[in-house]
Amino acid sequence: MSNPSLLILAGDGIGPEVMDEVKRIITWFGDNRDLAFDVSEDLVGGVAYDKHGTPLTDETMAKAQAVDAVLLGAVGGPKYDALDFSVKPERGLLRLRKEMDLFANLRPAQCFDALADFSSLKKDIVAGLDIMIVRELTSGVYFGEPRGIHMENNMRVGINTQRYTEAEIERVARAAFDLARKRSKKLCSMEKANVMESGILWRDVVTEVHEADYQDIALSHMYADNGAMQLVRAPKQFDVILTDNLFGDILSDCAAMLTGSLGMLPSASLGVPMANGRPKAMYEPVHGSAPDIAGQGKANPIACILSFAMALRYSFDQGAEADRLEAAIEKVLADGARTADLMGPEDGTPLSTVQMGDVILAALDASL
Ligand code: NAD
């Protein structure tokens, strides 16, 4: 059997810096856990535009379709702000998501005990928090037609359309129920069925899928506005939250900030299973290319490393090795390892990106 394949698209700004640490972790698993990957690398975003005049070439797109999982760093930067919309770095990312049909976006919000003071909420409300938001990523109001700005009675009118088919709801609901089954078997679905027909359909389809195949999961429904309140009032009441593209965009950012720093937040975007049974998948940190600190060795690599841990768990069925990597990160944080984003100005000297990689690798060594 050949090794599973990974395509690394490190991108712009701090993307390559944090991805360098992920590459060391990948090598560690090959050397120590008999878990070798065939790794290839290519360009996405501004660096691809600089070389090819496009943020993602057809060749790179084809490679992404062919591998078992894509690991992406970050794209964008001020150098590219004035470019035409069609060739902006972010278009490369959107093309990957669209053509790979990555309809389920998984955003964990996990609060490491050692960082509980970093949250804007009280420590006891967030300590030990571990929730997962599953956001529908390829349909809904960001894609629905008609859309645009036109004139009506001498006035400009802006239109976007919230649209979901039952098949689009069903497939993301199944992804969320499957996930809930691997966690604490609890799922809360959020929409606005009180004021939106698409919300009524969402609730109906989720309920039908539950009744048909997932009766072992405790399902609840909540209006998304109440969900936002509950997330900051008592977030630990949730485990898996399932929601649509628009509400998921907002609720996942809200949940993310419960945990403190952007430098800690991973994500996964999953599509339909390929011939080998693995889902199409792309793993990336939530943060962007951080031009303000790029090239200075200050970036926190943990969000990108945790994204690789998600790849181990969701693409390669290596939950125990994902646990090992997450435990190594938890350990170094408990021991006081901090990059600059996890420290106040009075807190001493921060670790560099590479030094954070070093201590995580040492903790992995110690785990053997
Ligand atoms: P950003 O996430 O790049 O940075 C926001 C702030 O968080 C900055 O102060 C940055 O220094 C800090 N930060 C982010 N990641 C960090 C890390 N790993 N370690 C330490 N500090 C970190 O968001 P932005 O400044 O709004 O956007 C910068 C560029 O990134 C823009 O071009 C934007 O379009 C792009 N962007 C890309 C993605 C992506 O590739 N998925 C996501 C968001 C923004």
Image (spheres, grey):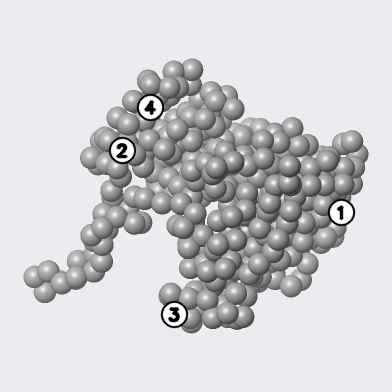
> On the rendered structure, is 33 left or right of 142?
right
The residue beneath circle 2 is: 166
Q: Identity of the amino acid at label 4?
A: Val
Residue at mark 3: C-beta within 8 A of ligand 1: no
The residue beneath circle 4 is: 209
Foreground label between 1 and 3: 3
The residue beneath circle 1 is: 358
Q: Which mark is residue 84?
A: 3
> On the rendered structure, is 241 left or right of 244?
right
Element class at badge 1: helix
Foreground label between 2 and 3: 2
Foreground label between 2 and 1: 2
Return the disc, 2 or 3, that comes first in the chain's sequence: 3
At x 49%, y 43%, the residue is: 272
Return the disc, 1 or 3, that comes first in the chain's sequence: 3
Residue 340, compared with residue 226, is above or below; it is: below
Q: Identity of the amino acid at label 2?
A: Glu
Q: Position of residue 284 (x, y in %)?
A: 61, 54
Q: Which mark is residue 304?
A: none
Q: Identity of the amino acid at label 1?
A: Asp
Mark 2 vs mark 4, CA separation in Å: 11 Å
Foreground label between 3 and 4: 4
- The foreground one among 272 and 356 is 272
Which picture quadrant has residue 193? top left
Element class at badge 4: helix
Mark 2 vs 3: CB contact within 8 A: no
Crowding at mark 1 (Cα within 10 Å: few <14, some 14-19, many 20+): some
Residue 218 seen by the camera: no
Question: Quick one: quadrant of the N terminus?
Answer: top right
